[in-house]
Amino acid sequence: CLVELIRAESMDLGVLNGALQTLVALGPPALPRLEPLLTHESPEVRQSAAVVLGQLEAPLGVPMLLILLDDADSNVRYHAIEALGQQGALVAVPRLLELAVSGDAFLSFAALEALASIQDPSALPELIGLLEDPLLAGSAAQALGRIGHPLALRPLLGVLPSVEEAPEAL
């Protein structure tokens, strides 16, 4: 069973990648097989589940990814964030905005990239506010540019001299 291969403690990388790609190829029918991996003791296994969930074209996997946003391991959370962006998960926007301002730069940048992929205009106020954050302004500008809403134009013009990514976002 593919899930048993992924759970194996001494699996080599080639076998892991093969098992993951097979689950992706299965598509949405793979979802029930992935659910037990979300609580596996190994962070690498939980991370693998997040990667597969991101690659599946299966909106039903989004609730599983939302669970992984609370994982103890930051790499698992990072891959869950990426996967939510790949899925275009509108329901995740509030949580992604929380992560964007969490103070954890590793997760903040991933959350901003996911928000850029999702392109939900409801994120505009928070993203515009992040243009004032020296660390996150560039990523916020890129997200605003990808959303492409007219309300982002004036704030982006306002940071044009100081944010390197602002011209590209416009």
Image (cartoon, grey):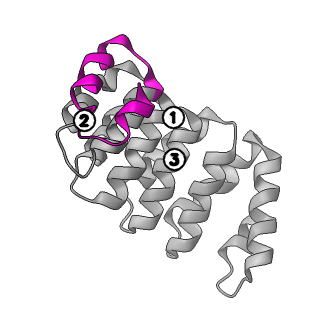
- Judged by depth in the image, the label closer to the viewer, 1 or 2, is 2
Viewer-proximal residue among 142 and 15: 142
- Secondary structure of residue under mark 3: helix
Residue at 31% x, 33% y: name it. 94
* Image location (x, y in percent) of residue 134: 20, 49
Q: Going by the picture, which residue comes out furthest to the top?
A: 150
- Of the numbered discs in the image, which one, if any, rests on residue 64? 3
The magenta segment is: 146-170
Whether residue 121 is visible here, answered yes or no, is yes
Pointer 1 local density, CA inside 10 Å: few below 14, some 14–19, many at least 20: some
Q: Taking 5 as reference, is 164 above or below it?
A: above
- Of the numbered discs in the image, which one, if any, rests on residue 117? 1
Residue at 79% x, 58% y: name it. 21
Q: Is residue 32 left or right of residue 163?
A: right
Q: Quadrant of residue 159?
A: top left
Asked if the magenta segment contains residue 133, the reply would be no
Q: Is residue 33 left or right of residue 154?
A: right
Disc 2 designates what residue? 161
Instruction: Measure how far apart labels 1 and 2 are at the Cα level.
Output: 25 Å
In contact (CB < 8 Å): disc 1 and disc 2:
no
